Image: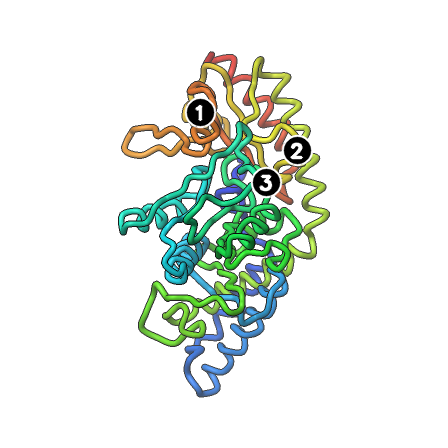
Amino acid sequence: MTAPGRVYLDWNASAPLRPEARDALVAALDRFGNPSSIHADGRAARNLVDASRDAVAAFMGCEPGEVVFTSGGTEANNLAVHALAAEARGRRGVAVAGVEHPSVLEPVRALERAGWRVLRLPVDEHGRVGAGPLPPGTGIAALQAANHETGARQPVAAFADACSAAGVGWHCDAVQAWGRLALRVTDLGCSTASLSGHKVGAPKGVGALYVRRGTPVEPLLRGGPQERSRRAGTENVPGIAALAAACAAAAEDLEADARWTAGLLARLVAGARQVVPHLQVNGPPDPDGRVPNTVNLSVPGVPAETVVQALDLEGISISAGAACGSGAVEASPVLTAMGLPDWRVRSAFRVSVGPTTRPEDVERFLAALGRVAARLR
């Protein structure tokens, strides 16, 4: 729950816990047995994990045996890149765009240090990868379903066709798309796809990786036969149960949530343009080109971290389009890859709404943004 008096507009960073997930989490705490144990307590935990796997598979649109439970989206993305690289059949080129999430780009950089060639896919000024054949020598590829900073939807169908034509396995980081777009992994056509629990209203620390049947998985974590020997370690039973409940609720509410968040965001963007002269939208200008809950904005002349801090003092939570660490500000690699002017990159911040965001939250944000922009400019 958001702190009293605050407005939470950072759903892409983490969504509030869904009531259904909270109930499932609490109930599962009594299933304390180890799912690998053969006694009654172990079987009770195993049955809950199995039932949860069925629910998550239904949400993702795949078979239960194609679901590997992980600690979240980062582990799922790392495991996917690792697994596909092990099956690249000697073609040591990885095709990837600079707009991918760091949990995809960092394992790709690890491959590069091991002698792989990184074949960088260009993106247009809206952050979308162009359709067309893969670069020669591609052994594996990756393309997100929706961008984590701008919400830009990627042409995954065309990309799947290109990968199929080249005989290349590819990974789809779909973390920011689940619960916002109607997705089925069988329609995506990818070899692997990631899901993060806390982006759909489950707790942090749980997620899943879809692995298409017939795709071998070289595990990152070793030491046990769990998850069909694809990910060792005792399963996070309460987290998995909560993930299943959150996925079921997200699927049931998908259409209504998409309409609600799209309407809120349309009001937010229109209002922001009224209160801030020369405001820029970074990413696809057409709302249909983005997930319905996300927009990335730049206020001329005001650094993003300053906007975030000023709005925080006003009781409003948003995210900067740049990563801050040790007092330094790193320009967003996503917006840089899009070729945007430096001022837009440095001024970019992300606003993301959710099903429990209220119209009055948007109005409060707009009033505060107007005050902050006028004062800081």
Label 1–label 2 contact, CB within 8 A: no
Residue found 42% across the figure and 23% down from its top: 346
> Mark on residue 243?
none
Residue 101 visible in image = yes
Label 1 vs 2, first from the N-terminus: 2
Residue 7 visible in image = no
Residue 330, position as x, y percentages in the image? 35, 30
Please tell me how crowded label 3 is: few (under 14), some (14-19), or many (20+) other residues with Cα within 10 Å. many
> Mark on residue 287?
2
Q: How is the image coloured?
A: rainbow
Residue found 33% across the figure and 46% down from its top: 109
Please tell me how crowded label 2 is: few (under 14), some (14-19), or many (20+) other residues with Cα within 10 Å. some
* Spatial CA span between label 1 and label 2: 20 Å
Label 2 vs 3, first from the N-terminus: 3
Q: Which residue ends up furthest to the front in the rendered image?
A: 136
Label 3 vs 1, first from the N-terminus: 3
* Spatial CA span between label 3 and label 1: 20 Å
Which-is-in-front pick, marks 3 and 1? 3
List the residue tagged with mark 3: 153
Whether residue 121 sits left or right of residue 284 in the image: it is: left
Secondary element under disc 2, as helix, strand or loop, is helix
Q: Amino acid at mark 3?
A: Arg
